[in-house]
Image (tube, helix red, strand yellow):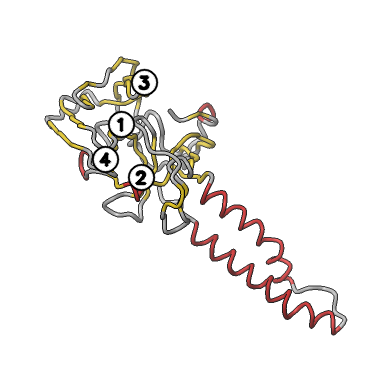
Amino acid sequence: MRMDFSLFFLAMIALMGTIWLLDIVFWAPRRRAAGVEKEPIAVEYARSLFPVFLVIFLLRSFVAEPFRIPSSSMEPTLEQGDFILVNKFAYGIRLPIIGTKIVDIGKPERGDVMVFRYPVDPRQDYIKRVIGVPGDEIAYYQKRVYVNGEVLELRPVGDHVTENGMTANVFAEHLNGEWHHILRMPQRYDPRELRFTVPPGHYFMMGDNRDNSNDSRVWGFVPEENLVGKAFFIWMNWHFGQWPEWERIGTVIK
């Protein structure tokens, strides 16, 4: 779900700013001396676009960034084709591109839907739900999640047809005082009995589509420096070759 245009916007800001500055310092005085009033089209575009690129860059870097969901690993909470907004300051203000935290505002909590850089390949952005925070004991067996020895309560909700046409069972799962929906595939047997202790500065992540998610059960923990932000809103839905699911637009992510 890579949609990081920070380098592009930074390059455009530098280019437009340089053209505009050169015009102010060198080219404009020469035009005035020669009696030429009309400025070159490149300068006109640079002067007009510089503030636009700057505002977009600042908003994407420090306020909210859009992402598109490319897979089914977070169904039914997020579906392929959902366009979401991610709060960039929920877990602290970070420098654009390099990601170094400069202001500590908050920490991820269990139940948050979080975007992060994939630990195996930080060039990729992943989105999963926070199940464990530093110090937590996480266990997973018989398709149930245990946090610090307590099994997460489940309530059956109904059925859901997945992207590939399979029928899955929908459950409401209780975590950190809130309910969210998960999927389980009744036809898939999972014999794993897994136990993890979340180390300091790391987080344990799982997809809501429990039988179809590449998450911390496979590759381990997410380090704090890989955090991108907290997903909070679906602002558009469109999947190639299909009509948008209008009812999903404007949904708050829980």
Image quarter of residue 164: top left
Closer to viewer: mark 4 or mark 1: 4
Quadrant that contains the C terminus: top left
Q: Earlier in the sequence, mark 3 or mark 2?
A: 2
Q: Earlier in the sequence, mark 3 or mark 1?
A: 3
Label 3 is placed on what type of residue? Gly
Residue placed under numbered mark 3 in the picture = 177
Residue placed under numbered mark 4 in the picture = 215
Choose between 27 and 188: the one closer to the eye: 27
Q: Which mark is residue 126?
A: 2
Q: Earlier in the sequence, mark 4 or mark 2?
A: 2
How far is the residue under mark 4 from the one under mark 2?
9 Å
Q: Earlier in the sequence, mark 2 or mark 1?
A: 2
Closer to viewer: mark 3 or mark 1: 3
How far is the residue under mark 3 from the one under mark 2?
25 Å
Image quarter of residue 178: top left
Label 4 is placed on what type of residue? Asp
Q: Position of residue 121 (x, y in %)?
A: 29, 54
Can you say whether 121 is above or below 111 in the image?
Answer: below
